[in-house]
Image: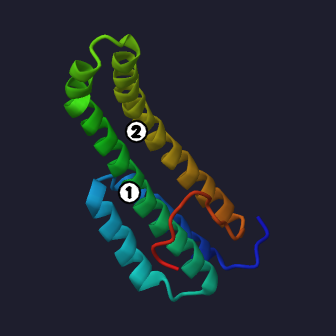
């Protein structure tokens, strides 16, 4: 593992990516990761970059999960209303049921994917790679 970055920096980054997996409490995770970034983000540019990525991944995950929960809630709440409006059309009812099932499945799948992304980011950070994780919103630039 030959890297131009000190081992201390790589352990700090590993802790930043590991923190959301150790404390999976929804909003407290954001606070913990931000506090970790605030206190240790100035160690080096490499650490700063990775801790920003860690916070942005966690914040994006929470935002995407909230949108999926809202979609799931709206489909189950207003599904009966739409079902009554289109009682003659079987496809509308199938769409509502499939939408609610698929949104629950997407929440579960997305929860697994976030752990895989964080583990891959930890491994790449220990090898000294600059990582940019796709599909995240940059809350901290």
* Quadrant in the picture for residue 101: top left
- Callout 1: 10 Å neighbours few (<14), some, many (20+)? some
Residue occupied by mark 2? 107
Expressed as whole percent of the image width and height from the top left, the position of residue 119 reads 57, 52
Give me the disc on residue 63. 1
Q: Is residue 42 positioned above or below 28 on the image?
A: below
Q: Does residue 57 appear left or right of residue 73 in this picture?
A: right
Residue at position x 54%, y 87% in the image: 43
* Quadrant in the picture for residue 27: bottom left
Expressed as whole percent of the image width and height from the top left, the position of residue 61 reads 43, 54
Marks 1 and 2 sit apart, C-alpha to C-alpha, by 12 Å
Q: Does residue 133 appear left or right of residue 22 in this picture?
A: right
Residue at position x 57%, y 72% in the image: 50
Expressed as whole percent of the image width and height from the top left, the position of residue 66 reads 33, 50
Q: Does residue 130 appear left or right of residue 115 in this picture?
A: right
Give me the disc on residue 11. none
Residue at position x 63%, y 80% in the image: 46
Expressed as whole percent of the image width and height from the top left, the position of residue 117 reads 57, 51
- Callout 2: 10 Å neighbours few (<14), some, many (20+)? some
Q: Is residue 20 positioned above or below 93 on the image?
A: below
């Amino acid at each position: 593992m030959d890297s131009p970055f000190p081992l201390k920096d790589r352990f700090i980054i590993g802790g930043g990516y590991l923190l959301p997996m150790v404390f999976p409490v929804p909003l407290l995770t954001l606070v913990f990761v931000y506090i970790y970034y605030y206190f240790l983000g100035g160690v080096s540019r490499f650490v700063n970059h990775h801790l920003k990525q860690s916070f942005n991944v966690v914040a994006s995950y929470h935002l995407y999960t909230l949108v999926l929960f809202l979609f799931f809630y709206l489909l189950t709440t207003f599904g009966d209303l739409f079902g009554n409006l289109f009682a003659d059309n079987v496809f509308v009812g199938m769409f509502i049921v499939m939408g609610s099932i698929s949104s629950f499945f997407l929440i579960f799948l997305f929860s697994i994917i976030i752990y895989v992304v964080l583990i891959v980011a930890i491994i790449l950070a220990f090898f000294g790679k600059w990582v940019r994780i796709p599909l995240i919103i940059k809350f901290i630039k």
